[in-house]
Image (tube, grey):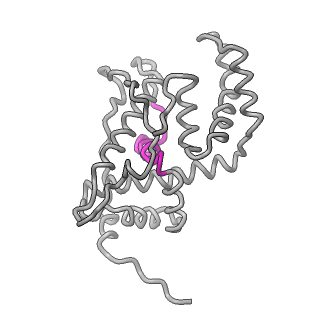
Amino acid sequence: MPYLNLVRGEPWAETWGVMLFPDDEAKRRAFVASLWLGFYPAYEKSGKGEAVPRSALLSVMEAAAAGAVEHDEIADRRYSGLAAGDQLKVLFALAQAQSKRASWNAAARLVEWRSKKSRAYLYRARSTFLPVIQLWAASILRNQRCQADEARGYTAIDDLQMFIVEAMALLQWATGFKLDRENAEPTLNHQAVDFWVPPSDWSPSVPRPGWPRDGRLQAVTLEERWIRRTRSRPPRKKPV
């Protein structure tokens, strides 16, 4: 089971690295290193925190230089990750509205209808990002935003921790939910996939009154016109 790095380095950068490159450690390290090179000079100049040892910074620069990741690849990865997460989000919403129809096929069909991406593209995206699909879905449910609010004592690290709690709640739901059919498999199967999760000794911040997020999942609904599309068979393609 791979574990998220939530206590060392810059945890938001580490988490985004995992979300974009769950299957490629070299590119993940290079991406995180490139983020460090972008934000660390301003951080050091501000003098708001402890400086990182030069040996550590040298290691970061070496990682960035050894495996630079093109902007187009990052954009493609992000788009595919969102396509995967959107399928889990729709399936989660469908389970609350029409639990008997809440399948991956139904979710992919609805996302295909809305996004105009092919079913093959959506299947590939889900296959590639399945180990982190709960993170992408949780990001979509919070509008892909970091919601830090310093005025309410809610830091970016607190928000990351609430984000992880939300993602793990989705994972827990998906590993327990399955269609009421003979031999039905769970929506997400721990036995088949190594999902990225927090270390066993990690514990999130305790939510305080007034915080904008407390780790609970937001309600998700589908419009009736979406639900109706799960009740009819897709049109057959005419032979060429």
- Residue in the image at 46% along x and 29% along y: 160
Q: Position of residue 229 (x, y in %)?
A: 34, 70
- Furthest toward the bottom, the residue is 239
Q: Is residue 143 visible?
A: no
Q: Position of residue 125 (x, y in %)?
A: 53, 57
Q: Is residue 59 visible?
A: yes
Number of marks in the image?
0
Please report the bounds of the magenta region as a residue range. Answer: 130-147
| Magenta-colored stretch includes residue 49 | no
Q: Nearer the viewer, residue 207 or 51?
A: 51
Q: Position of residue 173 (x, y in %)?
A: 30, 46
Q: Is residue 158 above or below residue 107?
A: above
| Magenta-colored stretch includes residue 134 | yes
**Helix, strand or loop: magenta stretch:** helix
Q: Position of residue 144 (x, y in %)?
A: 48, 41
Q: Nearer the viewer, residue 76 or 7?
A: 7
Horizontally, residue 175 falls left or right of residue 21, namely: left
- Residue in the image at 43% along x and 32% along y: 198
- Residue in the image at 39% along x and 66% along y: 105
Asked where in the image residue 166 lies, by quadrant, the reply is top left
Asked where in the image residue 51 lies, by quadrant, the reply is top right
Q: Is residue 120 above or below residue 25?
A: below
Quadrant containing the N terminus in the rendered view: top left
Quadrant containing the C terminus in the rendered view: bottom right
